[in-house]
Amino acid sequence: MLRRSIDTVARTGASAAHHAGGLFLLAVAIVRVTLSGQVRARHVFAQTYEIGVRSLPLVALTAVLSGVVTSQQGGYQFTGSVPLYILGSVVASSIVLELGPVMTAFVVIGRVGARITAELGTMKVSEQIDALDSLGRDPVAFLAAPRLIAGMVSVPALVAIANLVGLFAGLVAARATIGLGGEAFLYGARLFWHRWDLLYSLIKGVAFGVLIPLLSLHMGFLTQGGAEGVGRQTTQAVVFMIIAVLSVDAIFPPLFLN
Amino acid sequence: MPEPLIRFDDVYKAFDLPVLAGVTLDVYEGETVSILGPSGTGKSVLLKTSIGLIAPDRGDVTVEGRSVHAGRQALAEIRSRVGYVFQYAALFDSMTIRENVALGIRDEAARQLGRDEVQVRIEAALESVNLDPAAVLSKLPAELSGGMRKRVGLARAVVGRPHILLYDEPVTGLDPVNTAAVSHLIGKVRSAYGVTSVVVTHDVAQALEISDRVALLDRGQLRFVGTPAEFLASADPLVQAFADRDAARSFAQKEVEVA
């Protein structure tokens, strides 16, 4: 029993070290090909359109729902206990510091991260990545770097839009549910507002924008074993990305808010 | 004895189990060598070691006298002189046939040639594999049949005018008509471009038809290397068992006809 537990811990540790090493090497390779000018601008634009523009409707919808739910919950709890304009502060802080970046990250994981792993996984098992190598094209420059650069640029922009949309939806919901006027809501929102909060939110966006493509690319490149392997790897990648986003989210406050 | 163009020197490779157990084979300029063997005996792995897609655990592979493992630059130079035809063509789904074939011309070469000359080469490559450029150039791979995709894969391999062509199971999954067409194309490409070819296949008839020499890989080791005639005359029971009687008969028939 003890031996089996030790084996499991050792295997998990070895697997974690293997993935950490792979992620580091991939990140270094992406930096190398980017700095050496091997990445084509049109590939980056295409990926920015795919990751950024095409994710926008779903990100906006998620932000609307996050703003509405936060506003409704806060209104329910504050009515009769604290001044209602405090709701503006709660909604603003929740959206900008937490829900905007994290909900956007979840949308990007589902829409983009899973797709990247499945796409690269399929390319791996159908020898398209070998073909790129044989044709003198570096798969890191051709496939990985454009996706990572696009993620790094697109996700903070999506976070900024999600923040705006979420706040506006919260304001409308507060007026509709507890009759809190727009001015009172904005007064509350400004009351505990720090300029740093927006930057904090965007830095989270950049971190997620790097983390999600990097993990999905890494998992895609490791795919083996045909269609079943692609499915298995994609599921595993989504799990890793969710855990990674929540872990990074958890270490942000002690790093940046104290 | 001339220097070999490709030398597999005591190549070992294991994944969980040993796949290649000390393979030594020389391929000389201008010849076509087929590597035969049952599925799972490491034929494709051996081919991939020759352009560094798989690194051997032991031994070395040299192409035109340069080791595949002599660094990034050496490998890039070797790859620029080799065309590789993948088992299932490995075309890029999101790219048109034109874009797929254009990938076969290296960036530097494309810049030197200019846009018009690149287009001329792409069309010539497609014509050399019996495809009508006007009909296929703007199509996506999914819009073509399996046989046509294989031919596009071959066009992509030859468009860069390589000195060496490597074929990984070029007729797998094809019907007899397309198999014959692809075999014919391999011969046609050889005479048109004067390339040295290594063909990995489990199709004995095809190997005997297109090759100057045939090698039989068995459990990670070369069991036989010789001409098609020597292959058919071999007393080795494994070679005899492997040499499909119909293929042998077909080859013998052609030899008689030629004589």
Image (tube, rainbow, N blue to C red):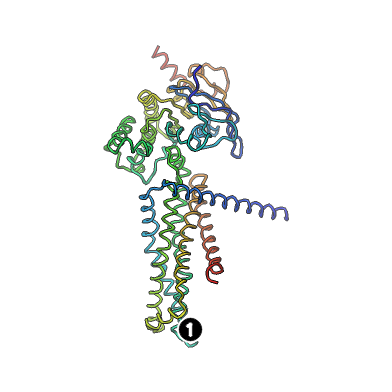
Q: Does residue A29 lie above or below B170 as drawn?
A: below
User: Could you classify mark 1 by the number of other residues whose Cα lies within 10 Å: few (under 14), some (14-19), or many (20 or more)?
Assistant: some
Depth order, front residue of A154/B128: A154
Q: Residue at x 53, y 71 (%)?
A: A257
Q: Position of residue A84 (x, y in %)?
A: 44, 84
Quadrant holding the C terminus of chain B: top left
Out of B133 and B62, give the one closest to the viewer.
Answer: B62
Task: Pinpoint residue B37: horizontal percent, then vertical percent.
Answer: 53, 28
Q: Report how many numbered discs are placed on residues in the image.
A: 1
Q: What residue lies at 38% left-to-right and 45% top-to-bottom?
A: B93
User: Which residue occupies the extreme bottom position in the image?
Assistant: A80
Q: In the image, residue A144 lies at what x, y percent? A: 45, 49
Local SS, label 1: helix
**Residue sitting at x 43%, y 20%:** B250
Q: Which residue is mark 1?
A: A78
The chain containing the residue under callout 1 comes to A
Quick check: can you spot residue A119?
Answer: no
Report which quarter residue B16 is drawn in: top right
Indicate the amino acid at tag 1. Answer: Phe
Residue situated in front as seen by the camera: B77 or B240: B77
Q: B140 above or below A86?
A: above
Which is nearer the eye, A200 or B259? A200
Residue extending furthest toward the right: A2
Q: Determine whether A18 is above or below B183 in the image.
A: below
Q: Position of residue B68 (x, y in %)?
A: 51, 33
* Residue B93 appears anywhere in the view: yes
Location of residue A74 with respect to B235 vertically, above or below: below
Q: Residue at x 57, y 19 (%)?
A: B236
